[in-house]
Image (cartoon, coloured by chain):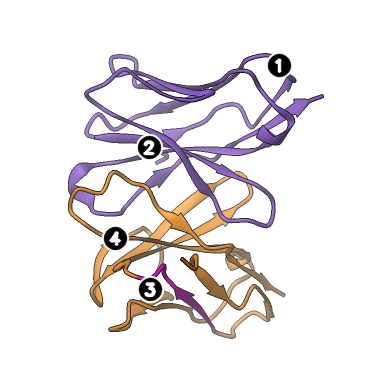
């Protein structure tokens, strides 16, 4: 079974630009979550999608947005990039059932550098 | 406001000895607690979890202990192996929060041969 796939793996942008990151979950998984990892901050929750609907949202500004498609693939977008947006962006998938205990399956991440 | 805290950014342990990683939380409404392990250039992988109604869960060399009154949990690795060298994230979630998992900042474990 293929794992969670994130593209691109690395990218460099300049301040003010926007970026779109893509995530393909494990086959059969309907929930996709996004996290931002920065040194010393751990993984900060961005949002979670299930069946094309946002079920949860973290405390990030509106510049951070996401969506999920009917095949469960997800994209996240960051507009008007700031230097502080430089981070590893991780996508995670799970079956999304109500009884989920928190076991998530992560991709390798997309490393964004903002210059 | 960090709901899950890991106050030790790093820990070094000799191979064969016990590694103890600690975690504190502030939200008494959490129902599940988890540990994830992350190697460089890889995504985190789930290691072990515990329900809030239990105080211990064991899986091979890994044991998680939960002290609800102190809002504290710990991960014990016995015996520690060089391959255990990684960043360990403590995490927690509420039953009603679907897949919103709250992570701590992580502890970098180095197991010295």
Name the N-terminal-most of marks 4 and 3.
Answer: 3
Which residue is denoted by mark 3 in the rendering? A62
Co-location on one chain, circles 4 and 3: yes
Name the mark on residue B16.
1
Where the C terminus of chain A falls, by quadrant?
A: bottom right
**Secondary element at image label 2:** loop
Name the chain under label 3: A
**Secondary element at image label 1:** loop
CA–CA distance between discs 2 and 3? Answer: 23 Å
Which residue is denoted by mark 4 in the rendering? A95
Of the residues tagged 1 and 3, which is closer to the observer?
1
CA–CA distance between discs 1 and 4? Answer: 37 Å
Name the mark on residue B3.
2
**Secondary element at image label 3:** loop
Q: Are marks 4 and 3 in contact (CB under 8 Å)?
A: no
Who is closer to the viewer here, A30 or B89? A30
Chain A, which colour?
Answer: orange
How packed mark 4 is, by other alpha carbons closer than 10 Å (few <14, some 14-19, many 20 or more), is many
């Amino acid at each position: 079974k293929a794992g969670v796939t994130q593209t691109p793996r690395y990218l460099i942008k300049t301040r003010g630009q926007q970026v779109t990151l893509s995530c393909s979950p494990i086959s059969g998984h309907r929930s996709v979550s996004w996290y931002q990892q920065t040194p010393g901050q751990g993984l900060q929750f961005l949002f979670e999608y299930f069946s094309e609907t946002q079920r949860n949202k973290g405390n990030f500004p509106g510049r951070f947005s996401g969506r999920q498609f009917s095949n469960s693939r997800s994209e996240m977008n960051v507009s008007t990039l700031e230097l502080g947006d430089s981070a590893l962006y991780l996508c995670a998938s799970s079956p999304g059932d109500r009884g989920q205990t928190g076991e998530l399956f992560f991709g390798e991440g997309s490393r964004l550098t903002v210059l | 406001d960090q709901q899950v805290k890991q106050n030790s950014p790093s820990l070094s342990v000799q191979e064969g000895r016990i590694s103890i990683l600690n975690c504190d939380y502030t939200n008494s409404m959490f129902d599940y607690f988890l540990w994830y392990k992350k190697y460089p250039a890889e995504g985190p992988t789930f290691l072990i979890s515990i329900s809030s109604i239990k105080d211990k869960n064991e899986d091979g060399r890994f044991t998680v202990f939960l002290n609800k009154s102190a809002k504290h949990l710990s991960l014990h690795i016995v015996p520690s192996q060089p391959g255990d060298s990684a960043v360990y994230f403590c995490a927690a979630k509420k039953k009603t929060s679907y897949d919103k998992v709250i992570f701590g900042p992580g502890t970098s474990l180095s197991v010295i041969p």
